[in-house]
Image (spheres, coloured by chain):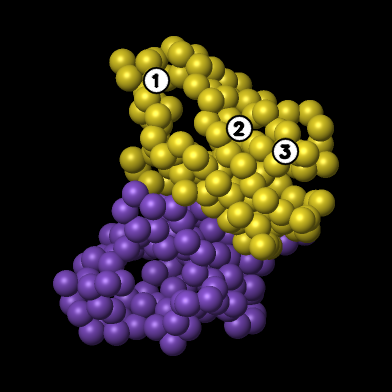
Chain colours: A purple, B yellow
């Protein structure tokens, strides 16, 4: 199957700083990427959907100014957590799909963010 | 709006036994996909099996099979000859049909323990 990578796998930062997480599709063009958040022992919660070259669509309750998403190319999407606070600590997972080519989404390995 | 319900938060079975995980969903869509994803301790989301709603035949992948009851909106996963490596969180998921760029809606998950 297709491979999606995330970088970094783990990040620890101080409160008030911004953190960028990258999601890359390694062997296919991802027209759409999705960003999820997962709290311990809970399910995945969709944060936003991003289509290449256009603004991301955020789910209700997700602050778009806090979680900045950029999908500037067909292989890369980034999630920037701005002015991070301890409550932003979580596991962030991205997935990617190629609209029209497949109906399958491929998931990255996730990024664990810890805000001190 | 679509919903996915997994009524078994946690299950344990002995190695080599067969186990069935339950899932029900609600939708007014006619064209959709159903998935079972596995999330082991590494937290990488792994697609276990996929079912297209228009297909009457139940999907099968080696030891994994589903019982898809469209009228009842039920989609259970059967794991035969369970192995220690099957220990993981299992998520049932729904996605509208149309190219893979629609969001996946996950159930809350079932934590499965395979006991030696």
The residue that mark 2 highlights is B76
Q: Residue at x 46, y 36 (%)?
A: B8
Residues at discs 3 and 1 both on one chain: yes
Q: Residues within 10 Å of mark 3 (few under 14, many from 20)?
A: few
Q: Are marks 2 and 3 in contact (CB under 8 Å)?
A: no
Q: Residue furthest bottom?
A: A65
Residue A95 vs B59, above or below: the answer is: below
Left or right of A25? Residue A18 is left
Residue A87 vs B50, above or below: the answer is: below
Q: Residue at x 60, y 21 (%)?
A: B62
Where is the N terminus of chain A found, in terms of image quarters?
A: top right
Marked residue chain, label 2: B
Task: Tell me how far mark 2 sits from mark 1, CA to CA.
Answer: 16 Å
Q: Nearer the viewer, residue B7 or B83?
A: B7
Q: Nearer the viewer, residue B116 or A97?
A: B116
Residue A78 in the image, given as x and y percentages of width and height: 46, 73
Residue A39 in the image, given as x and y percentages of width and height: 35, 58
Residue A101 visible in rendering:
no
Residue A53 in the image, given as x and y percentages of width and height: 64, 80
Residues at discs 2 and 3 both on one chain: yes
Left or right of B8? Residue A12 is left
Task: Tell me how far mark 2 sits from mark 3, CA to CA.
Answer: 11 Å
The residue that mark 1 highlights is B13
The residue that mark 3 highlights is B72
Q: Residues within 10 Å of mark 1 (few under 14, many from 20)?
A: some
Q: Earlier in the sequence, mark 3 or mark 1?
A: 1
Q: Residue at x 27, y 72 (%)?
A: A87
User: SS of the residue at dot 2?
Assistant: strand
Residue A53 visible in rendering:
yes
Residue B104 vs A54, above or below: the answer is: above
Q: Residue at x 61, y 32 (%)?
A: B76
């Amino acid at each position: 199957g297709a491979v999606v990578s995330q970088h970094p796998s783990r990040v620890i930062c101080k409160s008030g700083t911004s953190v960028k997480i990258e999601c890359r599709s390694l062997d296919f063009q991802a027209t759409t990427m999705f960003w999820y958040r997962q709290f311990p022992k809970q399910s995945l919660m969709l944060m936003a959907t991003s289509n290449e070259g256009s603004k991301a669509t955020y789910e209700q309750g997700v602050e778009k100014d806090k979680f900045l998403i950029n999908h500037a190319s067909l292989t890369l999407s980034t999630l920037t957590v701005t002015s991070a606070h301890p409550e932003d600590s979580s596991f962030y997972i991205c997935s990617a799909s190629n609209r029209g080519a497949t109906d399958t989404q491929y998931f990255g390995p996730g990024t664990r963010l810890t805000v001190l | 709006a679509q919903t996915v319900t997994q009524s078994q938060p946690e299950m344990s079975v002995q190695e080599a036994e067969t186990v069935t995980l339950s899932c029900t969903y609600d939708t007014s869509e006619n064209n959709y996909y159903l998935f079972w994803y596995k999330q082991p301790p590494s937290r990488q989301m792994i697609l276990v099996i996929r079912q297209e709603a228009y297909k009457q035949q139940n999907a099968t992948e080696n030891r994994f099979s589903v019982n898809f009851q469209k009228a009842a909106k039920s989609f259970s996963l059967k794991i035969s000859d369970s192995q220690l490596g099957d220990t993981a969180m299992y998520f049932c998921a729904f996605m509208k049909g149309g190219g893979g760029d629609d969001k996946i809606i996950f159930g809350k998950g079932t934590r499965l323990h395979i006991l030696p």
